[in-house]
Image (spheres, grey):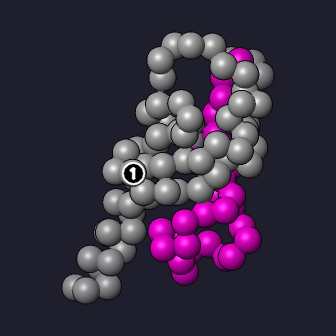
Amino acid sequence: MDGTPQEITNLVGREVYSNNGVFVGEVRDVHLDFERQTVTELALQDLNNELFHGRIDPGKGVMVPYRWVRAVGDVILINDVVERYKEEEEEKAIA
């Protein structure tokens, strides 16, 4: 994050991409820890079907820990954890 204060509501509706530039989903909601005054999770919807096929029912969303967020700008960049998880599953299926 660049340290620039942002309105939390500005996160809603932004597209989320992995570090590798793969579309993950769109922010639907933001979960907060009021005691610490921090964002804890992003609720994503309109997910990338290729990444989540067979794991998430169509029309459902996922929660992404905010600690995965690497940058917030016109889009939100997160660690490529989702892609790595998919690759590990594919490797298990091949073995």
- Report the side of 2 relative to 37 (left or right): left
> Does 51 appear above or below 77?
below
Residue placed farthest to the front in the image?
A: 74
- Report the side of 16 relative to 90 (left or right): right
Please provide percent x and percent y for residue 69.
49, 36
Badge 1 marks a residue whose secondary structure is loop
Magenta stretch, residue numbers? 37-64
> Does 21 appear above or below 56?
above
Choose top left, top right, bottom left or bottom right for residue 6.
Answer: top right
Residue positioned 75% across, 44% down in the render = 29
Q: Along the line of sight, which residue is nearer the eye, 94 or 22?
A: 22
| Quadrant location, the C terminus | bottom left
Q: Along the line of sight, which residue is nearer the eye, 84 or 14?
A: 14
Q: Is residue 32 visible?
A: no
Badge 1 amino acid: Gly
Q: Along the line of sight, which residue is nearer the eye, 56 or 72?
A: 72
Please provide percent x and percent y for residue 80.
38, 51
Q: Along the line of sight, which residue is nearer the eye, 72 or 85?
A: 72
Residue positioned 72% across, 40% down in the render = 12
Please provide percent x and percent y for residue 93.
32, 85
- Write down the residue under mark 1: 21
Q: Is residue 11 visible?
A: yes
Please provide percent x and percent y for residue 57.
67, 76
> Does 71 appear above or below 23?
above
Residue positioned 72% across, 22% down in the render = 7
- On whether residue 43 falls in the magenta region, the answer is yes
Residue positioned 64% across, 43% down in the render = 14
How crowded pointer 1 is (Cα within 10 Å; few <14, some 14-19, many 20+) is rated as few
